[in-house]
Image (spheres, grey):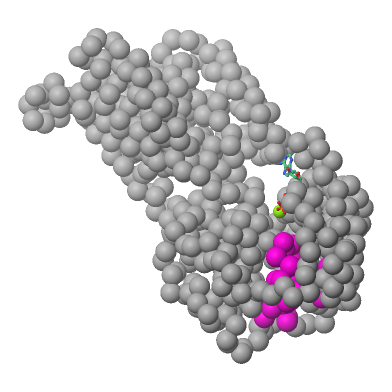
Amino acid sequence: MSAGAAASPARLPGAAVAQPAILLHVRDVHARLGGAHILQGVDFDVPGRGVTALLGRNGVGKTTTLRAILGIVPRSGTVTFDGQPLDGLATFRVILRGIGYVPEDRDVFAGLTVAENLRLAERRGVPPRYDLVFDLFPDLAARRRQAAGTLSGGQQQMLSIARALLNPARLLLVDEPSKGLSPRLVGETVAALARIAEDIPVLLVEQNLAAVRKLAEHVLVMAEGRIVHAGPAADFLADAALTQTLLGVSAGTGAQA
Amino acid sequence: MSTIVLLALTGIGLAGLYFLVASGLTLIFGLMRVLNFAHGAFLLLGGYCAWLLGAQLMDAAGNVSNAGFLAMLIAALAAGAVIGTLTELVLIRPLYRREFAQVLVTVGLGLVVGALVMGIWGGDPRNFPAPPWTHGIVRILGANVPASRFLLIGVALLVLVALVAFLRHTRYGLIVRAGVENRTMVSALGIDVRRAFTLVFALGGALAGLSGALAGVYFGAVSPGLGSMLLIDAFIVVVIGGLGSITGSALAALAVGLLQQFANYYFTGIGDLAIVLLLAVVLLVRPRGMLGAST
Ligand SMILES: Nc1ncnc2c1ncn2[C@@H]1O[C@H](COP(=O)(O)OP(=O)(O)OP(=O)(O)O)[C@@H](O)[C@H]1O
Ligand SMILES: [Mg+2]
């Protein structure tokens, strides 16, 4: 990817409609995988604007939480999106309600070209927002004919985000976008997400606390299959003892991206 | 020389038949992780539908016109498409996400259809009506090659080109290719991937039905054992070619058809053994098959 992501001043059109104060309610969500009780009553809210970061040590169930919301993983409990329950809906219907998903490990279709990956995301009757995604990620436009499997990790991440943004979404679920990226690419990804989050609320799973510091207004912390802390990001990150207990790392007030 | 030409063209003709059966199997498996044991039943129904229609259309000598023959092929194709679609909608879909149960259901359907065909039309081979030219001989490089070989080769090539074009250039082709890689992610883009499931079953059924009729031409008859016999070869082709890969299946079908013919001729009757050896070697060297995905 190029450095164009942060430099461009254009705002993302279309999404800046009135959003309810709380966009997503997650209540008492349980999920079992391979016989293990992974989610044990997850409760949280995602506000209708800004970035909400979902934190927690490896393997606590952050990815599973996103997949449970989308119905990829069978779950119990209730999830309400913009006042409408999502319970029992097939994954594609949840997505069509207006949720964009950027999975952990990108999951681009390796054998398809960049253009085909994007074309797959097109929907009947919905004008695809190619201008917007190529403005955010100019590198993708130049690589349209390249097989997605041959893209670098950073480029695949851009493609995965672009795919989720091609249609107007009212909420993005983004799972560890900085995973495996070099510090420079993490910076570019964070800049792109910051721009996206001006218009679309984002539920962001992230391990990189410097990225969280830059992006997030709220944090949710998971431990043992539950949310054990919810509150303003600044307060949480400033509390070295709390980050140490909940995450096993010290946020260190001087941490930078 | 003439023997080699005859063996080669017969091998390629058989390869065409294997490919028609295997292409549907490989798409179904690639997308749904279901090894469809009912595929032989689709083939059988196609073959017997064409035979039933042919029996109405044929003259006293057992010949049908070209138009009648075309109608028989279309009937086989349609019968296969209908049974394939119904199988997915009625038997497979209610067992969503339960792959093992799905496979068991296809085994059951395969057995039931085989027994039904046996019960209704008996176990003896039924002469398959066809236009006279399919029984003709083409002289090529000194060899006398039955014309039916060229029919199989031609239809298989046509289907190969059509399938590749479908996969490359249509929306559903794109969905199928993406779904073979990662169907969860296809759903996560807002696409109802279950429609693609029905589609590959319809398509696979149609091609299996068509190959039932073509097998009738090739062997001169249809019999209840036809389905399971071709299904085994097709399974081997699918595994050698790489599960989910159409071009892999085409190449593997070629390898299997040719090897089978040449081994049978030069080492009397070990054609099937040679294929199993080829399968073992491919699995040792490339466990995912010739063109199988590497991830
Ligand atoms: N299909 C599965 N079968 C059994 N266990 C699973 C399955 N998928 C995930 N798990 C387990 O569920 C737990 C939560 O996994 P999850 O991927 O949600 O964690 P995470 O918080 O996203 O971790 P990370 O930060 O490493 O990405 C882990 O212990 C994992 O091993
Ligand atoms: Mg995770």
Look at the picture and state if A219 lies above or below B141: below
Whether the magenta-drawn stretch holds residue A208 is answered as yes
A11 sits to left or right of B31 = right
Whether the magenta-drawn stretch holds residue B163 is answered as no
Where is residue B96 shown, x and y percent of the image?
Answer: 70, 39
Please state, as top left, top right, bottom left or bottom right, where the N terminus of chain B lies in the image.
top left
Look at the picture and state if B226 lies above or below B123: below
A132 sits to left or right of B248 = right
* Depth order, front residue of A254/A36: A254
Q: Residue at x 53, y 46 (%)?
A: B180
Where is residue B196 shown, x and y percent of the image?
Answer: 58, 48
Q: Is residue A245 visible?
A: yes
* Depth order, front residue of B246/A220: A220
Residue lying farthest bottom? A9
B168 sits to left or right of B192 = left
Q: Residue at x 48, y 62 (%)?
A: A152
Q: Is residue A127 visible?
A: no
Where is residue A189 shown, x and y percent of the image?
Answer: 61, 72
